[in-house]
Amino acid sequence: MASSGLELLWVSLPQLAKGAGQTLSISFLSIAISTVGGVLYGVLRTLNVMWLNAILRVYLELFRAIPVLVWLYLLFFGLPIFFGLSIPSFWCAVLVLSLWGASEVGEVARGALHSLPRGQREAGLSIGLNAAQLYGYVLLPQALKRMTPPTINVYTRIIKTSSLPVPFR
């Protein structure tokens, strides 16, 4: 009995390795895209532009309120039905996890940027830095230290959630 279990494992090993590699590929691509998108989201939310904040808030609420599996089904099955647009399963998973991860990382980045003392922004502006320099040299490096623990938590959730698209492969 035990040998049949080992034989099954041995026979299944190539397929398991392929699935693990695809899951890791989806995870790492999604983490990279969601980090960039999330930091951009966080910076845009701190600019205090009313209409932009409203749009970003709707995006955040949509991706927080609707489960990731529902987004996967909507994009993978819904786009071909309603719009005639078909996305390969791998890229559909990367897209959904990236959008979801960017909303999570974005809120972490926004919170970290808002937690910085106001004097940091004022000091950067007083020495003549433009907005890009202010964020690049003063605010984001300080916010990065505050963002690291919760962002690692988001990355862990992305890796765990990347096993959801298995039926789509």
Image (cartoon, rainbow, N blue to C red):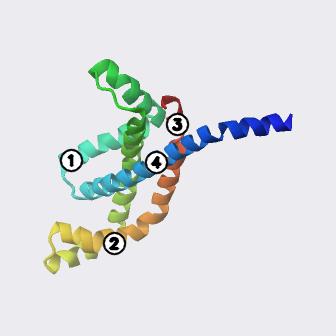
Q: Which residue was labeled with disc 2?
A: 141
The earlier-in-sequence mark between 2 and 4 is 4
Q: CA distance from mark 1 to mark 4?
A: 32 Å
Closer to the camera: disc 3 or disc 1? 3
Q: CA distance from mark 3 to mark 1?
A: 32 Å
Element under disc 1:
helix
Q: CA distance from mark 2 to mark 4?
A: 28 Å
Dot 2, crowdedness within 10 Å: few (<14), some or many (≥20)? few
Element under disc 3:
loop
Disc number placed over residue 164 in the picture, else none: 3
Res. 118 in view: no
Dot 3, crowdedness within 10 Å: few (<14), some or many (≥20)? some
Q: Which residue was labeled with disc 4?
A: 25
Q: Which residue was labeled with disc 1?
A: 52
* Amino acid at pointer 1: Leu
Location of residue 32 with respect to 87 vertically, above or below = below
